[in-house]
Amino acid sequence: MRRNASGVLAVFIGILLGACGSVLAQGIDVGAHGGISIPNLRGNDTDVFSRGFKSREGIYLGLSAELGLGPLASLVAQLNYTSQGGLRRGLQPITMDLPPGLPIPPGTILYADFRNETILDYVEVPVMVRLTSRGKVRFFAEAGAYAGYLVRARAVTRGSSALFLDEQGTMPVIVPPATDPLIVDLGADTDVMDSLKRTNLGLTGGGGLIYPLGRGSLVLEARFQLGLTTIQKDVETSGDTQTGAVLVSLGYALPLARHK
């Protein structure tokens, strides 16, 4: 029994070493990259908290490792810091705290005309399969999945506005004995981490080109991300939203191990 177990273990180790040798024969490249994130928030069109967000711009930085699987195929893993979120302007529901004492029934949704930027910073790990062409300047396409961990979440609002009881802005809030609509300063920088899920999963894919330079290569990459996780903990009061982004970066990769 022990001999059989030892034999199986020896075969397993041999297969593992052979696979590692095959990968090393193709090469391992490591690099760093930086660029811009153009994120957006996607929501249900019937959800007043989620709809109406447009793209904003954020930073995108990271490290990468590329393991050769064959002459034209490789496995790419990255560790990235990316800023996501969205921007909404105009009449929209209010989610921040308002001055106390307003004669509004609990649970009432109020609307106002203001600027609302949601900033969500994630540490992400995408893993992708990359197919690369031959030639001096090599083109590639890649696809895979990613996992993200939320490290910062802010809602930055700007503007002053009347408050309304309806989304169309036809029913202003008037507090007697005043006869004019109540105007409220909506400027705030609010930490919203407690209302959001920390983890986010999604799909990713894109392409780019690799240009040899010195000992390594310049890597120009454009990639999209499609978040599949609803980011809010409570969809009833905060919305039902997923993240997404277009990522554009320029990086430099160096061969760490390569056998001829």
Image: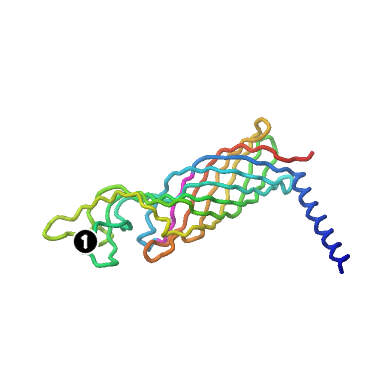
Residue 104 location in percent, x, y?
23, 64
Residue 218 location in percent, x, y?
61, 35
Dominant secondary structure of the magenta stretch? strand
- In the image, taking residue 245 as reference, residue 19 lies left or right, namely right
Magenta residues span: 37-44
Instruction: Give the quarter of the image for residue 3.
Output: bottom right
- In the image, taking residue 184 as reference, residue 231 lies left or right, namely right
Residue located 29% across and 63% down the image: 109
Residue located 32% across and 49% down the image: 188
Residue 192 location in percent, x, y?
40, 55
- In the image, taking residue 215 as reference, residue 99 lies left or right, namely left
Residue located 41% across and 64% down the image: 235
Work out which quarter of the rendered image holds the N terminus and state it. bottom right
Residue located 66% across and 37% down the image: 254
Work out which quarter of the rendered image holds the C terminus and state it. top right
Q: Amino acid at mark 1?
A: Leu
Residue where numbered disc 1 is placed: 102
Residue 257 location in percent, x, y?
73, 41
Nearest the viewer among 122 and 151 is 151
